[in-house]
Amino acid sequence: MVITQQGTILIVEDNPGFRFCYRTVLEAEGYTVLEAEDGAEGWEMAQTKTPDLILLDLMLPKLHGFEVLERIRANPLTSSIPVVILTVNEDPKDRQKGLKLGANDYFVKGSDSPKHIVKMAVGVLARA
């Protein structure tokens, strides 16, 4: 079975276990996956690799996810890239803030299977 190339997704996540889970599901679906383990690296890769979708954690070393999101939305080179916040933080205020800053969606890790969350996140890409 040949899997066609679906696009490139950047995962900005400091937890290697979470990166592994989401990368595995995305690659099985035919996506090319880029990984950044802190906010500064994620911001740099967003600018230089211009992925089709960014899965962004909030609690990151070097640059907080909200700051990464603000930079993505402020830069003409990256402003149109769909961004899905993927975090363990269930606080409704953070969800509201993320969406206000320009996230396309907000998912809580652990609230559902990685496969289901990836399906929902990729749906954002399809609508973009």
Image: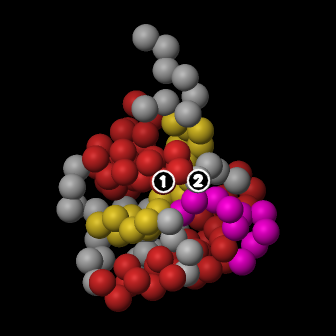
Find the residue positioned furthest to the top: 1
Circles 1 and 2: CB distance less than 8 Å?
yes
Q: Which residue: 36% across, 45% down? A: 119
Rendered position, 13 above or below 121: below
Q: CA distance from mark 1 to mark 2?
A: 6 Å
Dot 2, how many residues are within 10 Å of its Cα: few (below 14), some (14-19), or many (20+)? few
- Residue type for callout 1: Val
Q: Is residue 110 magenta?
A: no
Residue 76 lies in magenta, yes or no?
Answer: yes
Q: Return the x and y of residue 6 as percentages of the image width and height.
A: 55, 33
In front: 19, or 79? 79
Region in magenta: 74-83
Name which residue lies at 21% across and 55% down. Answer: 112
Q: Is residue 128 above or below residue 12?
A: above
**Callout 1: few (<14), some (14-19), or many (20+) C-alpha neighbours within 10 Å?**
some
Nearest the eye: 19 or 46: 46
**Residue for badge 2:** 128
Residue 124 disc label: 1
Residue visible at 48% across and 53% down in the picture: 124
Who's the residue at 62% across and 49% down the image?
52
